Amino acid sequence: MKISLAYSAYLFLKEQLQHKRILYPHQWLKEAYEDLSKRGKKDMKKYKAVIYDIDGTVLNTLNMNMYPLMRIIKEELNEDWSFEDVLKFAAYPGMKVMEELNIKDKEKTYARWVQYVNEYADGATLYEGFEEVFIKLEEAGIIQAVVSAKTKAQYQIDMVEKGLDKYMKATILAEDTDKHKPDPTPLLECLKRLQFQPDEVIYIGDARSDELASQNAHIDFGYAKWGNVAQEEMKNATIVLEKPLDLLQLI
């Protein structure tokens, strides 16, 4: 499902009118706006559930992940990488980073990276607008869930201790499946737990691996553009979201 031209035009006119950039010079413009409003709202697909990625989507975890990774690279490879150098790994699952760096003892080194992340002074922060999104989607009866490569220990610190887990009806984390994104297994496991069909949900993420996982699971994908530092183009995204509050369009 792509956002229709009618709905795009409706959103544009709505913004212009709200900011009084244009007025109704003719009756036909008012009638056109009202017609687009009706048709546009019909065109927006209604989902029974919204499933979120966490890092770069719900939480800003860039610094707390990248600076500890620079420390790991120094310890394991004896190389000094800049923050800009490691940014290419921002959207990678943790073990994939270990593979790309050719780390010898991947599991042990990854565990140490997680330790450094958990000890990082400036922890994860919720992207602005998400508290309102969680509350309003819940009030609208839309189920919310998480599919993330985070470990359960990380989830406890980043989500549970912040009181955010209360909005989630299901959480699929690193330990819950043998295969990980872009493989569809985590998303399919989430569907199983929620008892929904693929066409009844949308997955929100910031990375190419999120988009591919959605495709592989035959689930619609919402591109959280605010979290993608590389500003990659997601050609198969069902909807492109510029800011968290754009998620309220799904109600």
Image: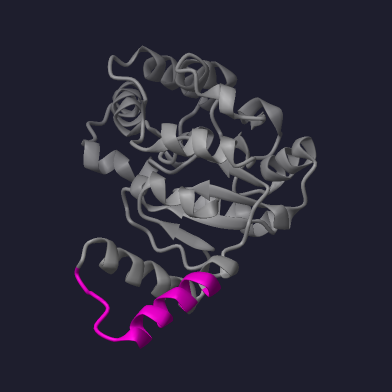
Residue 250 is situated, as x and y percent measured from the top left of the image, at 54, 53
In front: 3, or 77? 3
Q: Is residue 245 magenta?
A: no
Most common secondary structure along the magenta stretch = helix
Q: How many marks?
A: 0
Q: Position of residue 152 (x, y in %)?
A: 59, 20
Classify 67 as above or below 21. Answer: above
Percent position (x, y) of residue 123?
34, 20
Task: Judge left or right: residue 136 versus residue 183.
Answer: left
Q: Residue at the location (53% across, 28% down)?
A: 150
In magenta stretch: residue 29: yes
Q: Please state if 44 lies on the left or on the right of 197 as rendered.
A: left
Q: Does 77 sit above or below residue 121?
A: below
The residue drawn where x is 53% and y is 22% is 155
Which quarter shows the N terminus? bottom right
Where 179 sits versus 232, above or below?
above
**Residue for point 33% across, 25% down:** 64
Q: Position of residue 200 (x, y in %)?
A: 71, 53
Please, which residue is most extreme toward the front here?
27
Q: Is residue 84 visible?
A: yes
Tell me which segment is drawn in magenta: 21-39
Rendered position, 192 above or below 234:
above
